[in-house]
Amino acid sequence: MPRPETSQTGNDTPMEQSTDLWSVVTVTVGITVFSVAQGLTYPLIALILAERGVSDAMIGLNAAAYIAGLGLSVLVIPTFSRRLRASQVIVAGLFGTALAVLGFALTQSLLAWFLLRFFMGACVNAIYVFGEAWLNEATSDTVRGRVSGMYSAGMSAGFVVGPLAIPLFGTANGWAFACCALLLSAVAFVLALMARRAKVEPEKPYLSDVPTFIRSSPALASLVLLFGFVDVIALSLMPVYMTNNGAGSGMAATMVAVLCGGMVVAQPLLGLLLDRMNRWQVARLCLWVMAAIFVLMPLLPITHPLVWPLAALGGAAISGLYTTALAILGREHKGRMLVAGASVFSLAYAGGGVIGPAFAGGISNAAPGLVFLPIVIMGAVGAWVLRHRR
């Protein structure tokens, strides 16, 4: 087995390359439309299970099956992708996700839904790992921050738009799932055509590269772990916080939309900042802003007009952590380590996404007013650690 390539770290300037614009557009458009489908299916599955009388605990376990598929697929993706190009792996992941989504429309078996959710997680992981590695491989470092910002904005926008389709299709008869499967298949077909004009491809992954990456870049892996931790807390517990303080369900849902809207709007602007500043300093800035926002929000009544811009700014700071991590990954790592880093990002986000809500949920039950305390602590501690990371 060939040895993994040595990563480039620190502030040394890597050898410059030109940006393969066609690859960048292919990945960004593909992920954006794919995120619309994800944004539709996540709440749709939960709503349908709730309508069937499935317990909240079982709905949570079903979501955990997705996370399990996301994490365990790292063990098999290297073998599966050995003879395929990155674009072919992404297309296979899109078609696999389409089949899983169609399966939800064809069966009501709860056991089948668990298996389908696990399979969907595995397919989604393949899409993101190769998509993000391909994006960084195709991008010149002089514009990497802006490209990462546009990518993150597109992905966030998809998650905002997706749930808006639920009132259009409803939750009965499986029409929403069928249309989502059709959309995913169309995206896979178009992406396969667009990928033919791509000039670059990421290297093949090796499972042994994953621990190598973690040992070489613990701060970067921890940054994505922290992002998963706070991202899922904010999105899942913001409605709980709002309703516990007297807001109606409509206002709570609107607050989540504002939080996500901040994620979308701010990322291209953050990308400009990433191309002009030290990227680790930008990560620290996002962490401090995030901590400050979630200190201030519980101090204000939910009817205060400042709550809305604070929520948008908080969403921007949270999403900025991943945008920054993606830009740092492309600068500090090349070749096989780039693909390994994208795999570690998936594992780290999954781990943070499991730990965060469980931890914050326990605090919320004990002291509802302190639901955002874990975000504040992680933001402040993370910023301090990054300051002393070298």
Image: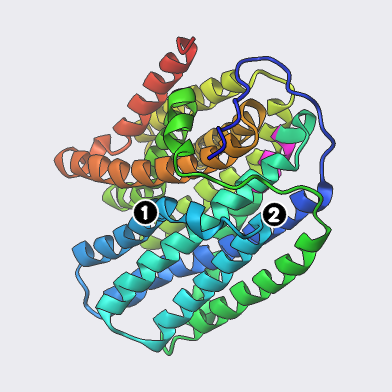
Amino acid type of the residue tagged 1 in the rendering: Leu
Residue 154: where, in percent of width, then height?
A: 65, 52
Q: Earlier in the sequence, mark 2 or mark 1?
A: 2
Helix, strand or loop status at disc 1: helix
Residue 132: where, in percent of width, then height?
A: 61, 46
Residue 202: where, in percent of width, then height?
A: 67, 46
At 31% from the left and 47% from the top, the residue drawn is: 354
Crowding around mark 1 (Cα neighbors within 10 Å: few <14, some 14 to 19, many 20+) is some
Image vertical order of residue 294 relative to residue 58, above or below: above
Q: Residue 46 carries which label?
A: none
Image vertical order of residue 243 relative to residue 234, above or below: below
At 49% from the left and 28% from the top, the residue drawn is: 220
Label 1 belongs to which residue?
72
Q: Does the magenta stretch include residue 293?
A: no
Residue placed farthest to the left in the image? Answer: 366
Crowding around mark 2 (Cα neighbors within 10 Å: few <14, some 14 to 19, many 20+) is many
Image vertical order of residue 179 relative to residue 381, above or below: below
Name the main secondary structure of what is drawn in magenta: helix
Residue extent of the magenta highlight: 145-152
Residue 161: where, in percent of width, then height?
A: 58, 63
Label 2 belongs to which residue?
27
Helix, strand or loop status at disc 2: helix
Q: Nearer the viewer, residue 54 or 253?
A: 54
Q: Which of 185 and 246 is in front in this view?
A: 185
- In screen coordinates, is 270 left or right of 119? right
Amino acid type of the residue tagged 2 in the rendering: Val
Q: Is residue 149 magenta?
A: yes
**Is residue 319 something one can see in this rendering?**
no
